[in-house]
Image (cartoon, rainbow, N blue to C red):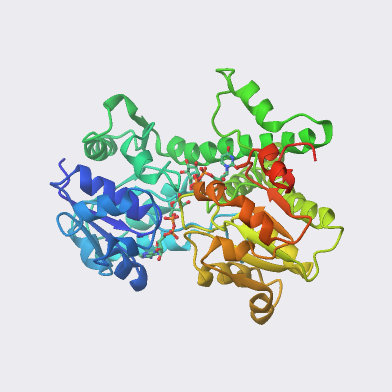
Amino acid sequence: MSIKNICCIGAGYVGGPTMSVIALKCPDIKVTVVDLNEKRIAAWNDEDVSNLPIYEPGLAEVVQEARGRNLFFSTEVDKAIDEAELIFISVNTPTKTYGVGKGMAADLKYIELCARQIARVATTDKIVVEKSTLPVRTAEALQNILHNTGKGVRFDILSNPEFLAEGTAVQDLLNADRVLIGGENTLGGQKATEALANIYSNWIPEERILRTSVWSSELSKLTANAFLAQRVSSINAMSELCEVTGADVQEVARAIGTDSRIGPKFLKASVGFGGSCFQKDILNLVYIAKSYGLNEVADYWEQVIIMNDHQKRRFAEKIVKTLFNTVSGKKITLLGWAFKKDTNDTRESAAIYVADYLLSEQAEIVIYDPKVSQEQILADLDYLNTRSEAENRALVTVVNNPMEACDNAHAIAIMTEWDEFVNYDWKQIYNQMQKPAFIFDGRAIFVPSEMENIGFEMYTIGLAY
Ligand code: NAD
Ligand code: UGA
């Protein structure tokens, strides 16, 4: 079966870049990305590609080339569903904030709404692809909805989780380590799997296209994120031990990372992992394990989150303790708000929780991030509901200029590892700051001795203080 029309429901951090790359690599396929959010779609259609709703290196160029040729962004969801032979569901699956499983389980209401909409609109056979990250066995629920329309339309459901990381999304999509397709072991399931595999084979080598059962594919996505986050929590646990023993976590990471069985990646100690998925997906995994009565499995993975929460909190505590046990009325500059460099995404960013802690200690916070807006930063803080919106605005200032951000500060905390931070005129910044001038390097971007030579009092994550 050859696919000529693709629809993707959800024009977010996954749907947007993924479909842009598919459109780029498959000029004969019409790819329509739809979303209910009109503002987001308008931004995807903005003539000036520097205004796309998502900042990702290389994305603007891809969109520029494919948009209007075979890549379209639209709010006409029904029309795109009707036209497509293959539909990706790429909507958000956040942690539930209500009812059974609150704070743990994935909220599948957006997924179910998509399935019901597809069931209502479809008049021709469709391949429905789970692109969102979903609890294992979600396809069963989709099947129940889609196979009972009574309209004689055939639906084949595939799982095709996305492994891109933000900040490197385009490169990850162009050079994927692997593409995973889970399908039913029936003739129809195999045909659907091959139809999707044919799309990817336009640029992904055949040996990197893995085929599994639907359940293995769904669970592999949660497992991959759990393993990645576990590595970060593992090295972060060691960072605390390094700080009290005089070992250097970066040296430890290099020493263990050169063991080919361990490998060097994902061993960077930090102020804590953020992002929309690690925490959400592990909580979901813990919830699934518990729901099967597998309490030891659940406890094992929950520890990854407990360690991460601890890492964020202890960084904030370190700032207060070092600043002579009070930050009340002191100006503290946070450099970086995004959860990692090269993205404008702030979901679950460690900066939010560190800022919240310091605000509760009545610090005056000044924030600079090269890609995050004031509106987003204040919305992130308001969302926590720790204090009133008015109080957040009274204590928080967001500026567009890093020098201004650091002017007269008692301390600077590095929250995101943006490349530009290293290249500032740190001598001048030192001169403009209150003394002693503290830097809390939550990303280990500086060589501490170089900064100490300027005069800074340095705290680097994972290094004895
Ligand atoms: P997102 O919030 O950026 O985008 C989801 C979009 O879906 C939103 O724009 C929303 O308006 C839209 N939407 C929701 N319900 C809709 C409906 N019924 N009809 C039309 N549009 C609808 O989310 P995201 O970061 O792109 O993540 C999407 C999924 O992909 C999640 O399951 C996530 O776990 C997974 N994932 C994310 C990443 C990542 O890096 N962000 C990577 C891999 C997997
Ligand atoms: C992660 C995975 O890497 C992707 O494969 C996956 O598709 C995605 O989640 C998802 O499912 O959403 P992402 O969250 O975009 O991607 O970014 P990562 O590079 O994984 O970083 C996550 C967090 O861990 C960041 O806050 C980062 O700073 C932190 N991190 C990462 C560290 O603190 N140390 C490291 O060594 C690596």
Q: Which quadrant of the figure has residue 218? A: top left
Image quadrant occupied by the N terminus: top left
Q: From the viewer's perspective, is 438 left or right of 175? A: right
Depth order, front residue of 44/411: 411
Spot the residue most to the top. 260
Q: Is residue 130 above or below residue 206?
A: below
Q: From the viewer's perspective, is 250 left or right of 133? A: right
Q: Work out whether residue 301 can be spotted.
A: no
Depth order, front residue of 308/369: 369
Spot the residue most to the right. 325
User: Which x, y percent locates residue 185?
Assistant: 33, 33
Q: Work out whether residue 275 can be spotted.
A: yes
Depth order, front residue of 169/199: 169
Spot the residue most to the bottom. 390
Image quadrant occupied by the C terminus: top right
Q: Residue at x 77, y 38 (%)?
A: 240
Q: Residue at x 47, y 60 (%)?
A: 371
Q: Is residue 249 above or below residue 283?
A: above
Q: From the viewer's perspective, is 195 left or right of 460? A: left
The mark tally for this picture is 0
Q: Is residue 302 above or below residue 204?
A: below
Q: Which quadrant of the figure has residue 349? A: bottom right
User: Which x, y percent locates residue 326?
Assistant: 84, 63
Q: Residue at x 51, y 72 (%)?
A: 375
Q: Which quadrant of the figure has residue 104? A: bottom right
User: Which x, y percent locates residue 381?
Assistant: 62, 69
User: Which x, y percent locates residue 401?
Assistant: 53, 64
